[in-house]
Image (tube, helix red, strand yellow):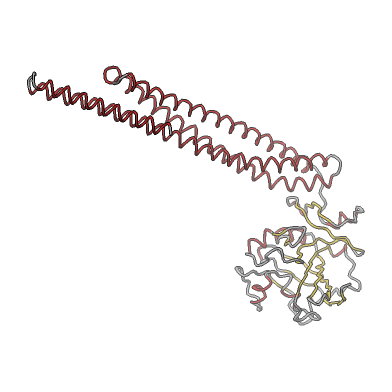
Amino acid sequence: GEPGQVTMNFALLMILVVETYVFSITVDMSTEEPILAQVQTQSSFAALDDVQLIANGLLQLGKNLRDFVQKTKDQINDLIQKLNIFDSSFYQLSILASEIKEEEDELKKTTVMLKANNEEIKNLSLEINSKAEDIVRERVQLRNQVERLELKLTGLSQGLLSADQVAEISALKEVIQAQERSIAELLKAMKEQREHLNYQKNKIKSLENKVHCYNFPKHCGEIFGKGEETNGLYAIKPNQSEPFLVYCEFTEVGAFTVIQRRQDGSVNFDRSWQSYEDGFGDFKSDFWLGLKKISSIASQGDSVLHVQMEDWKREKYLMEFECSLEGPASNYTIHFKSGGLTSESQTRIRFSTKDHYDGNNNQNCAHDYTAFTLCPLAFSKGAGGLVVVETSISMAKASSANLAGRGSNGSTTKDKAT
């Protein structure tokens, strides 16, 4: 390439200069005093060494700058790709935000999603700021090095460099200046992207402030009480917690919050304790709401646990239990009312996972099912030994669900799937 040709030309020039000086010194040694000739030879070679050292330094600096610009371009392209993804996400969120003015329920859903994206945008902004600072710092260091080399080169070139060598060094300086201009353009692009991110963050913050002024329902029962009858996602805010989305299911007997659904095997439920606290999955298929959210819902009073299971024969099992749920201090212990599951079963069960065993008698239960809702219920009276294919578990306030004919003390009804 062109940098390689410049390097070869410069090396040939240096060889010619060295040979010229050697020849000159050989002639002078026959006519001058030996001591004087030796001093002049050492001085000439010392000057040539300085020139060669500076020239090599400039060549190496030019190569380093070229590599640095290429690396910076790759980083900027990566950041721009990420920003394009966020632009697409933000565009979708903007559409939802416009619908907020017309429907309050859409406003609640959008804000919960925006909070998660806002954290990602903050992290990306911090990453961009850090890389921009590194680029500016390295640019200043490179500029200082070039200035120092230029000063030394100016002093040496006046009596030692030929016109061709000076022209070659000037060409290298132009390359360095072009690279600096490229770096400046990249920094400008990064600044514009950072300003765009800040604009997005401010819009998200504005939407969050609007939502905080809204009086969220505490549970699905309140939504049902306002006349809503369509199953789907709704935002609730129980007991002063942060708003979050839940799937509400409305039936003829009341409103239920679906806390677990397993229907197509698309989500792995063999998870850690932390995952079960935070929740996982997709509301559109299989999911677990999360112990923290379930606990905040259940802390509003006694609840009804509604369980629907289907085995491989397509036979359905329906169960309901009055219960209450404690918080994390007791490993989210669930208490069953009216005799619990059966008169022989436990009425107080702590949540367990494979990495957080609570000491219950059935160790395999925590390993196989990894959820307190499945462990006692899968082996309860009337459903012993069944192989569960589909499971749906939901909760409701005890006062908002009618348990008549539903097995309020843990009985099980069995229906053929239609």
User: Residue 149, how many percent across, how many down?
Assistant: 35, 26
In the image, residue 135 sits, relative to residue 244, either above or below, namely above
In the displayed structure, would residue 39 be above or below residue 411? Answer: above
On the image, which quarter does residue 223 sit in?
A: bottom right
Q: Which residue is drawn at 59% across and 40% down?
A: 79
Q: Position of residue 283 (x, y in %)?
A: 76, 58
Looking at the image, residue 236 sits to the left or right of residue 65; the answer is right
Q: Where is residue 280 in the image (x, y as percent from the top left)?
A: 69, 59
Where is 223 relative to 28, above or below?
Answer: below
- Quarter of the image for the C terminus: give it: bottom right
Q: Is residue 151 above or below residue 63?
A: above
In the picture as drawn, the residue positioned furthest to the top comes out as 158
Q: 107 and 345: which one is in front? A: 107
In this rendered view, identify the residue nearer to me: 254 or 284.
284
Q: Which residue is drawn at 58% across and 42% down?
A: 78
Q: Residue at x 10, y 22 (%)?
A: 29
Pick whichever, 178 or 22, lies toward us: 22
Residue 24 percent coordinates (x, y)? 17, 22
